[in-house]
Amino acid sequence: MQFPDDDNGKMLAAMAEAGIDLTKALDVDFFLIFEDQRDAESAVEELSQSELEGELELHLNDELGKWELIVCINMVPEYQAIVDQEVELNEFAAEFGGATDGWGVMQHQEGDDEFADHDHECDDDCHH
């Protein structure tokens, strides 16, 4: 498989090299970061009432000192679909003073851990 030479393309290439089947739907976690708790909670409320089909999780990322909203969407991880979803979520987050902060796919297979997150570092309080 060929992927564009950018962060998303590199992540997908690494996932493919790790043996992850990119033709099947996976739970893709998109990370949104907010400075203010109220803004983050307003974003959660708005998303929960939207057409978005996915799971939402909000917590304080102690390492970043910011509120992190994880939007988990079950989708086939195609390059353009991921880019489109990131753009849409970034525009949404901006309305609440936030921004996207990468994406990741959790895999519970040995050896996949190094590809679990893109532009995201977990801490002891992380739930993914």
Image (cartoon, rainbow, N blue to C red):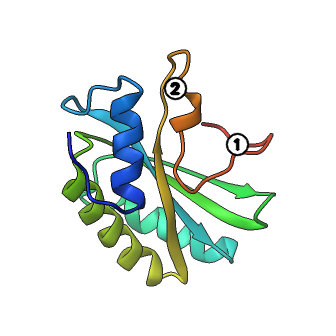
> Quadrant of residue 27 in the image?
top left
Upstream in sequence: badge 2 or badge 1: 2
Residue 119 rendering spot, x and y as whole percentages: 57, 57
Which residue is under mark 2? 112
Q: Amino acid at mark 1?
A: Cys
Q: Amino acid at mark 2?
A: Asp
Q: Which mark is residue 71?
A: none
Q: Where, quadrant-wise, is the N terminus in this rendering?
A: top left
Category of crowding for the residue at label 2, using alpha-carbon neighbours closer than 10 angstroms: few (below 14), some (14–19), many (at least 20): some
> Quadrant of residue 125 in the image?
top right
Position of 86 compared to 107: left or right? Answer: left
Residue 70 rendering spot, x and y as whole percentages: 52, 52
Residue placed most toward the observer, 35 or 16: 16
Residue placed most toward the observer, 128 or 105: 105
Q: Nearer the viewer, mark 2 or mark 1?
A: 2
Which residue is under mark 1? 126
Residue 36 rendering spot, x and y as whole percentages: 68, 77
> Quadrant of residue 69 in the image?
bottom right
Residue 77 rendering spot, x and y as whole percentages: 27, 43
Mark 2 in CB contact with mark 1 (< 8 angstroms): no
Residue at 37 percent across and 56 percent down: it is 8
Disc count in the image? Answer: 2
Q: CA distance from mark 2 to mark 1?
A: 18 Å
